[in-house]
Amino acid sequence: MRPFEFLKTPRTNIRRLQARDKDGLIELLSDRSVTENMAFPEEILTKEGITDLLEMTINSYDSEKPLLSFAIAENNSNTFMGVTGFGPLENNEIEVFYALLPKCWGKGLATEILASLTKYILTKTDYGTIVAPITQGNIASIKVAEKNGFLNYGLKEDPNYRDLIFIFKKVKTEYNLRRS
């Protein structure tokens, strides 16, 4: 799957990460209130690890195996607000993720971003199911998934997380039925 150049939501631009996003990405991934709900190894959550991850992501966009991670930026100022993206899974499924700086929380941005990603994936790709793994304590993300019509398929073990996680899914056939 090729990474897109740009997606627009009412208040944000979802775009490829750029070198100028380094400070914002370091701020985001250095904040434990953000990363406690993410599946990153500790060695990546250092200034050096985050810098390497950013460079690797930027360099991968035009490769055979791009990392499908994108910046979330404010529409008018292009100010870095967070990251979002997706990764292919097995069985025609694709996993989505999003993380915003805490100053952007509680404004409905994650709901808006997930709606845009959902529409893109289910109308512009061949994937049949979107998966959103969410930690049990991440009530805000559970609400975001539910507002976007994702269904909770229950708790599951995942080697990337310490505890059981909820698996929320949205299936293309259900999405198409609701749109008609």
Image (tube, rainbow, N blue to C red):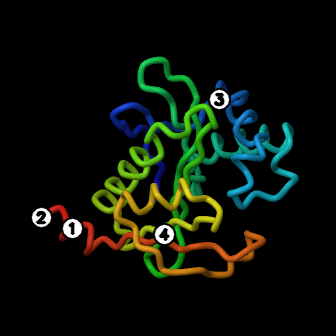
Residue found 65% across the figure and 45% down from its top: 57
- Tell which tag, 3 or 1, sits nearer the viewer: 1
The answer to whether 157 appears left or right of 96 in the picture is right
Query: Residue 165, percent across and down?
Result: 63, 73
CB atoms of marks 2 and 4 within 8 Å: no
Q: Which residue is mark 4?
A: 131
Kind of residue at badge 3: Asp
Q: Earlier in the sequence, mark 2 or mark 3?
A: 3
Q: Which comes before the other along the chain, label 3 or label 4? A: 3
Disc number for residue 176: 1
Q: Quadrant of residue 20?
A: top right
Residue 32, how many percent across, how many down? 78, 46
The residue depicted at 33 percent of the width and 34 percent of the height is 10
Where disc 2 sits, the SS reads: loop
Of badges 2 and 3, the one in the foreground is 2
**On the image, numbered disc 3 is attached to which residue?**
21
In the rendered view, would you say 151 is above or below 6? Answer: below
Label of residue 180 in the image: 2
Task: Give, as a three-letter code, the residue at label 4.
Answer: Val
Q: Position of residue 46 (x, y in %)?
A: 86, 43
* Mark 4, secondary structure of its residue: strand
What's the CA distance linking mark 2 and mark 3?
A: 39 Å
Mark 1: few/some/many CA within 10 Å (<14, 14-19, 20+):
few
Label number found at residue 29: none
64 sits left or right of 150 in the view = right
